Image (cartoon, rainbow, N blue to C red):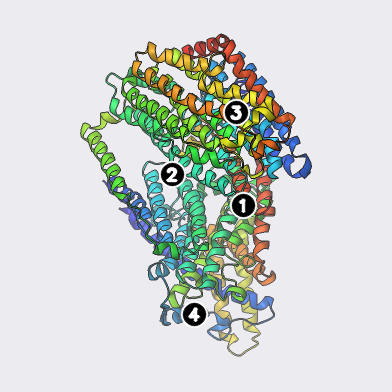
Amino acid sequence: MLDTVFFYLFTLLTLGGAILTVATRNAVHSALFLITSLLGVAGLYLLLHAEFLFAVQIIVYVGGIMVLFLFVIMLVNLDAAAAQRQFSRMWPVALGCVALVGLELFYFLGKGEPAFRIAAPPPVPEPTAGNTERIADVLFSQYLLPFEIASLLLLVAVIGSVVMAKKRI
Amino acid sequence: MLDSFIPSWAELLRFMPEIILSLVGSLLVMLEPVTGPKSKSMLGHVAIAGLIVALGATFVAHANPGAAFSSMIVVDGFATFFRVIVFTVGILTIFSSYQYLDREGSNRGEYYALILFSVVGQSVMVVANELIMIFIGLEISSIATYVLAGFLRDDKRNNESAIKYFLLGSFATGFLLYGIALIYGATGTTDLGEVRQAVLQSAEPPVLLLSVAAGLMFIGLGFKVSGAPFQMWTPDVYQGAPTPVTAFMSAGPKAAAFAIFLRIFVTVFESVGDRWEPLIWASALASMTIGNFAALQQKNFKRLLAYSSIAHAGYVLVALTARSEIGTASAMFYLAAYALMNMGAFAVIAHVAGKGETTVDVSDFAGLGAKQPVTAALLTIFMLSLIGVPLTGGFFGKFYIFKAALESKLLWLAILGLLNSAVAAYYYLRVLVVMYMEEPSARTENLEPMPMSLQAALWLPAAGVLFLGIFPSAVLEFASASARLLGQ
Amino acid sequence: MEFFIVSTIKALLVFFVLMTTLAYLQWVERKVIAHIQLRQGPYRVGPHGLLQPLADVIKLITKEGIVPPHVNKFFYFLAPIIAVSMSLIAISVIPFGGEIEVFGITTHMQLTDLNIGLLLVLALASMGTYGIALAGWASNNKYSLLGGLRSSAQMVSYELPLSLAIASPLLLLNTLSLREMVTQQEGFMLGFLPNWTIFQGPAPQLVGMVLFLIAAFAETNRIPFDLPEAETELVAGFHAEYSSMKFAAFFMAEYSNMLTAAAVTTTVFLGGWLPALPGMAGDLIAPAVFATGGAVCLYHGLNPARKRDKYTLPVFALVFFGLAALFLAPPLKDIAMPLFWFGAKTGALLFVFIWIRGTLPRFRYDQLMGFCWKFLFPVAVLHLLATALLVALAG
C-alpha cells in the first residue's frame, strides 16, 4: 500500500520534473526541474531495493553533474535567451508523435502484461547479500569487460573535451 | 571467488587487438607533450605501427575463435572481417592525414590518439555479442569521431560539422538505447544469443513490441549509416570535417554500424523478419534515390561524395533486405570495397584541397589528368569502382547485392537499384570528364608533388579495389562462410 | 508501534542535543579563536559568556527578516531550507553508541542504520551544495552569485578527493553501514593499540584521514577554504542578502556540516564510540577526567579569586563529580561510556577545525582549485591504489 503511494509519488516527480524541464523558459528552473526528475528516479531505485543505485544516482547526477549544469547556467547570462521565443512551430508535430506513442502505450496496456515480455522473467535470486555486494559481484564478473571498456569511453571524452575546449594546446 | 575475476589467456587473446590499440592510444597521449612540434608525425607512425600489430593480433584471435568475457564478445569470421576493415581504414586515414595536418598547422598527437580510440570503439562494436557492449563501443567510436570532425577548432566549417554530428548523433544514440531497453524489458537479457533464443522459443512472440524495438534500433543505426530518412546530417558534416576525417567517417564508423546492423537484424530479429523488411526496403530505396539525385546537383566534391555515400548505404540496405546468407555476405563484401574506394577518393581530395580546404569543388580538379597523371589515374580507378565498372571491387559488390536481391524475390528493388546506379554513373563520370578534358584550373596548375604518405594512402586502396575486382572469390568465400556461421 | 514511539523519542532527543551542541559549538569557536588571538571572547552574557548562544538565538529570531526586492522569492526562501535540512538529516545515520537497554527496551544509540549509510552522508553533502548555489543565484547580487558559483565549483571538485579518501578505509571495513564499521574496528592490537582504521593492518589509514579532513574542510566551507563567503572579497558571499532566521539557517547548516564531518571521521577512522584504551584503563579515563575537572573547580572555589567564585565554582565541582560518578554506576555506565568516547573524539576533531581557522589564512581561488586537482586528487588516487594493493596482498 505504502509502496504504491510512493511509487506514484516518485513517478509524478520523475515525469512532472521531466515535462517542466522542457516547458519552462528559465534555464535555472529547467535545471532544477531536471534535478527533481532525477531525484524521482532515485526514489524509484529505492523502492526496488536498489539502495546503492539510489545513493549513486544522487551523488553522481544530482550532486555532481547537475551542479556543473547549474554552474554553467549561472555563469552564462541566459536572461536574453529566456526572453526570446523558444518554441518552434514544430510543436504540432511533436504533439502528433506524443499522441502516437501514447496510443501505442495504451494498446500494450490494453493487451495486458504478457504483451510486454516474450521470455519468462529471469528468476530473481534470493537476496543473499546487500544490493552493493550484488552489484559488485555482477560488475566484476559477468560485466567486467563493459565496465572496463567504459573507462576508455571516459578517457576519450576527457581527451575530446580538452582538445575542443582548451584555450591553447 | 577471486579466480572468476581473472580472464583466461584465450579470452585475452580474443580481445587482444582492442587491448593493443587502447594501450597504443594511451601511449600516444602520454608521448604528445614530450615530442617536439616538428616531430609529431612520429606519433602517427607509432599509431600506424599499433594498427598493424592489431591487424596481426586479429588473425591470431581468428585462429582462436569463440566467445569471451561471459560471452560479452565473440570472435568469429564476421568479427574478423570487420575488424580488418576498420583497422585498414584507420591505417589509410593516418596515411592521408600527415600532409593535411601539417598544411593546416595542427599536427598534434591527440589526432592520432583519437583515431585509434575511434577504431577501438568500432572494433568493440563488431566483436560485441551483447547490447551493452555494442552501445559502449558505438559511443567510444562516435565521441572520438565528433571531436575529430571539429579538430581544426578555428575553422567555422569544422565547428559546424562537429556540432551537427554531435547533436544528431547523440539523439540517434538515444533511439538505439530505447530499442535496447525494450529488448531487455521483453526478454530480460541483453545477450544477443539469449535474446535470439528467447524470440525463437516464445510460443506466441508479441511481434508488435519486438517490431517497436527493432524500429527504434533501426532509427538509431540508420542515423549512423546515414540511410534515408535519417541522412540529412551527412552532407553538412562530411563537407565541414577535415577531409581525412571525412574519409574515416564514411568508411570506419559506417562499416562498424552496418556490422551491428547485420548482427542484430539478421540474427536476433530474424524470426520477425517479415515485419521489418518493408521498413528497410523503403529505406534502401529512399537512400539510393535521394543520394544519387541530390549528388547530381553538387559542385563541391566532398558534398558529392557525401550524397554518394548515402546512396551506397542504400545499396547495402538492399543487401540487408534480402535477408539471406548471400545477402549478408554481399553486404560485407560491398562494405570492404566501399571503404577502400572511398578512402582513396578522399585521399585525392585531401591532396588537392589546399590550405583551408579552399579548392574542393569538382571544377578545381580540372586538368589533373595532364598535371599529375598518376593521381588522376588512381582517382579514375576509384570513380569507376564507385560506379561499379567491371574489374573493380565496386562491380562485384553491386553484382552480388543485386544477385542476392533477385534471389530473395526483390525484383522491383533490384531494378530500381540498377536504375539508380545508372544515374550515379553520370556524376562520377563528370568528375573524370572535368579531370581529363578541361583546361587546368588555378589549383592544379600549382599542385605540389604528392608526398610519400599520401601516395601510400592512394596506392594501397587502389590495389585493394583492383584485387577485389579481379579476384573477388577469396574474400567473398570468407564472407559467405562467416555469414553462414552468423545465421546460426 | 513501539518502534515509532522509540524512534520519535530518539529523534527528539538527538534534535535537542544537536541544536544545543550547534549553539555551543559556536561559543566554543569564538572562545578558542579569541584565546588564539590573545583576546577574551564572549564574556558579558552569563559566566564566561556561557549564555551568549542563547542571546544570539533570541536576537536572530526576533530580528526583522528583510527580503530585498530584487530577489527570486521562491528560491531565495528555498535555499536556506535545503542547506539546513540536508545537513541535519545526515546526523540520522551517525551511531553515537552501541546497543543499550532502557526501561526494558533494547535499542541502538543511533537514529537509523542504513546499509548505505556512508553513501547517504555523501549524497546529502552533495545535495547541500544546492542550498548555497541557489542562495547565490536567487539573491540577484553579483557578490552572492560569485559566492554561489565558487561554492558549486569547489564542492564538485573536492567531492572527488573526499570520496576517494573515504573509499580506502572501506576496503578494510568491507561495509557501508556506519554501525558495522564501528563493530569492525573493535579490539586491540598488541594489547594496547586500538584496532581503528588509522592503525589497522594491512594498510593504516592515517594519510586517508588527513586527506578526508582536508577535503571535508572544503566541503564545509571552513577556513582556509571558505571562498564562497570570503568576507574580504565578496562581502559575505552567498548569504550577503540573508538576514534573521534565514541567515541563522545557513549558519546552522555550516556548523552542522562540520559536526557531521567530524562525526563521520570519528566513525570511519577513529573507531566511533569504542574506547581508546583496553580494559579498566579505558573505563577509568572518563571518570578521571571529570573528577580532575571537579577537583580543579573545588580548589579554585576554596581559594576564590573573586568573591562570587566562592559559590559558583563548588557548584560546578559538584556537577563534575556527579558526572564522574555517572561513569561508575553500572546501569548508566553502558550509556555514558560510548557517548563519552564518541564525544571526546568528535570534540577533538572539532577543535582541530577551529584551531585551523585560527591559524591559516584563506586560499586564493586558483590556489584552491590547483590544490585540489593537482595535489589532493592525485594523492587520494594513489592512496586508494596503495591501500587496495596492500589489502589484496594481505588476502
Q: Nearer the viewer, mark 3 or mark 1?
A: 3
Please tell me how crowded label 3 is: few (under 14), some (14-19), or many (20+) other residues with Cα within 10 Å: some
- Do the residues marked 2 and 4 share a common chain? no
Q: Nearer the viewer, mark 2 or mark 3?
A: 3
* Residue for badge 1: C161
**Apparent side of residue A133 relative to residue B277 in the rendered image (left or right):** right
Please tell me how crowded label 1 is: few (under 14), some (14-19), or many (20+) other residues with Cα within 10 Å: many
Residue at (33, 57) in percent of width and height: C5
Question: Which residue type does callout 1 highlight?
Answer: Pro
Residue C56: mark: 4
Q: For mark 2, give the secondary structure.
A: helix
Q: Are marks 2 and 3 in contact (CB under 8 Å)?
A: no
**Apparent side of residue B485 relative to residue A24 in the rendered image (left or right):** right
Question: Which residue type does callout 4 highlight?
Answer: Asp
Marks 2 and 3 sit apart, C-alpha to C-alpha, by 73 Å
Q: Nearer the viewer, residue C99 or C74?
A: C74
Question: Which residue type does callout 3 highlight?
Answer: Met
Residue A51: mark: 2
Q: Residue B258: x percent and y percent?
A: 48, 26
Residue B437: mark: 3
